[in-house]
Image: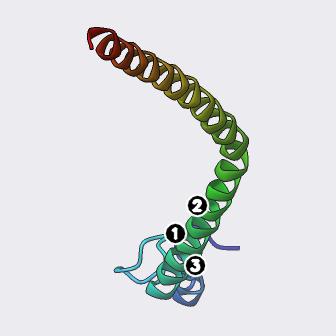
């Protein structure tokens, strides 16, 4: 057998080499577009799933918070109305006594 340097030219060209402009592992334009479409679709699905999960998680919390706000507002309104009515009655009684 001969030395490796003495190998025939056909044997050396038999190994496939990428074209000089193509980099090993570089994606073709079609692969890049496919990857972008898949990633965009995945992002939409993740965002939708996140929104659904957030709504599910936040719904009971927001319901309790709004119930508490309504209760507090009613208490404040009731106290304010009692105060207004008490002052109005006192003023009216004071006017009657002055007559």
Distance between the alpha carbons at the discs numbered 3 and 2 = 59 Å
Disc 3: which residue: 7
Residue closest to the eye, 91 or 99: 99
Reading the chain from its start, which is encountered first: label 1 or label 3? 3
Up the image or down, 5 lies above or below 47; here it is: below
**Is 6 on the left-hand or right-hand side of 54?**
left
Residue 17, position as x, y percentages in the image:
50, 80
Q: Quadrant of the N terminus?
A: bottom right
**The residue tagged with tag 1: helix, strand or loop?**
loop
Distance between the alpha carbons at the discs numbered 1 and 2 = 30 Å
Disc 1: which residue: 25
- The part of the image, by quadrant, that contains residue 51 is bottom right
What residue is rendered at 64% in x and 67% in y?
A: 45
What residue is rendered at 53% in x and 72% in y?
A: 40
Of circles 1 and 2, the one toward us is: 2
Q: Quadrant of the C terminus?
A: top left
- The part of the image, by quadrant, that contains residue 4 is bottom right
Q: Residue 43 — which label? A: none
- The part of the image, by quadrant, that contains residue 44 is bottom right
**The residue tagged with tag 3: helix, strand or loop?**
loop
Disc 2: which residue: 47
Residue closest to the eye, 57 or 42: 57
Residue 82, position as x, y percentages in the image:
50, 20
Residue 22, position as x, y percentages in the image:
41, 79
The residue at the far left in this view is 98
Q: Residues within 10 Å of mark 2 (few under 14, many from 20)?
A: few
Residue 7, position as x, y percentages in the image:
58, 78
What residue is rendered at 48% in x and 78% in y?
A: 32
* Colour basis: rainbow
Q: How many marks?
A: 3
């Amino acid at each position: 057998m001969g030395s490796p340097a003495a190998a025939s030219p056909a044997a050396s060209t038999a190994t496939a080499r990428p074209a000089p402009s193509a980099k090993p592992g570089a994606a073709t334009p079609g692969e890049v577009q496919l990857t972008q479409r898949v990633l965009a679709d995945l992002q939409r699905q993740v965002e939708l799933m996140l929104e659904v999960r957030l709504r599910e998680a936040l719904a009971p919390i927001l319901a309790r918070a709004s119930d508490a706000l309504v209760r507090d507002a009613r208490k404040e309104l009731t106290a304010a109305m009692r105060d207004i009515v008490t002052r109005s009655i006192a003023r009216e009684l004071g006017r009657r006594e002055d007559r």
